[in-house]
Amino acid sequence: MKIVITGGHMAPALAIIEAMPKDAEIVFIGRKQAFEGDSAVSLEYEEITQRGIEFVILPTGRLQRSITRHTLPSLLRLPKSFQTARGILQEIRPDIVLSFGGYIGLPVVIAASTLKIPSVIHEQTTRAGFANKLSARFASTICISWESSRQYFPTSKSVLTGNPLRKEILQARREKKKTDIPRIYVTGGSAGSHAMNVLVEKYLKELTALSVIIHQTGDTREFGDFARLSKLRETLPPELRSRYKVEKFLFSKEAAEVMASSDLVVSRSGINTISELIYFERPTLCIPLPTGQKGEQEENAELLTALGLGRVLFQQKADDFFLSQIKEMLERRSTFYLNDPSQKERFSTAADTIVRILSDVAKKTSNEKI
């Protein structure tokens, strides 16, 4: 089977890549830069090329949530992206397309439909992303992660599969700590979070006095957070400096081990991160992205809180309550536990289920052409 994988969510895409048969031919269509107008290389490009998988860059605009100097040029690229995606698919000639949503996935799914190439889309969120709502009209099958998403898609094409987790997540073991000092993992997602980075910067001495900090900053050149925080680390007293580890990225295996071994996670609340936190049952201080789509990250954070694992700190109030919330959660970390273990049961089988669906859809389409 020759498959094109595309879309804006890297974690489930990697889970499917790992679950594909060894003889499957995979091509990934994505973005090389993490942000519009920024030269920083995207994590998806790093992850995919590191695995030796062919990466095809699709220049396309995105539907931005705020107006910037990049908005108009971005919108003007949208129509051409469909034509470009069609040309890419004509050259690759895949048996099937798998999209994980986002502005990258939409033109690929639409282009596939014009070439009679079947497509499967996967929705990670508890609702439905805008791109996936549009893509659903052209897809053969829609895989959903949560039952609450079913209402947004055609029932006849929707299958509850769960959100696939990477093997590194499913197989990760908690590293034994050499000391009793608690460990905090701070992550703003693969691209990092400038707002969260600034919070850590402001309270770095207090945080390192409390715990070991593993801080994933991202590599956005606009703010230069990684370089600035790396320099700040060198100004700390030696005993505190050894407690602060700052990284641009953490690749799959390392990120899984860090999350599994942390006493507390401070994180945005994208649904893939929330899924991993549920699987590891990690106490988490969620700082939802305030510009997220229709409060999606706030809803995800509330899901984690309802399951007994999280607290929500809104970014508007984070400056005043960040340190006090961390202190309190560290003191009470033993009281955070997953109150509904059934929520994570599908995680271990989701990838294999989706791979089976891909195979069935590809075979069905092939037989119909005969």
Image (cartoon, rainbow, N blue to C red):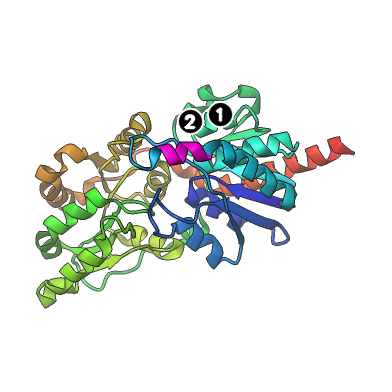
Dot 1, how many residues are within 10 Å of its Cα: few (below 14), some (14-19), or many (20+)? some
- Residue 223: which quarter of the image? bottom left
Name the disc covering residue 328, or none: none
Residue 191, horizontal then vertical, whole percent: 37, 53
Does the rendering let one see residue 94?
no
> Residue 294 placed where, x, y %?
36, 28
Count all numbered tags in the image, as a single digit. 2
Q: At 57% across and 36% down in the image, what residue appears?
A: 79
Name the residue nearer the viewer: 198 or 37: 37
Seen in the image, is 360 located left or right of residue 59? right
Q: Residue at x 29, y 43 (%)?
A: 309
| Identity of the residue drawn at 48% across and 41% down | 61
The quadrant where residue 369 appears: top right
Describe the element under mark 1 as helix, strand or loop.
helix
181 relative position to 18: left or right: left
Query: Which residue in the protein does label 2 denote?
Result: 130
Quadrant occupied by the C terminus: top right
Quarter of the image where one finds residue 243: bottom left
Report if residue 173 lies within the magenta region: no
Helix, strand or loop: magenta stretch: helix
- Name the spot of residue 113 as percent of width and height, x first: 70, 34
Residue 255 lies left or right of residue 119; in this view the side is left
Distance between the Cα atoms at labels 2 and 1?
A: 7 Å
Bounds of the magenta segment: 72-77
* Up-down relation of residue 235 to residue 147 (above or below): below
Q: Amino acid at mark 2?
A: Phe
**In contact (CB < 8 Å): disc 2 and disc 1:** yes
Q: Which residue is mark 1?
A: 134
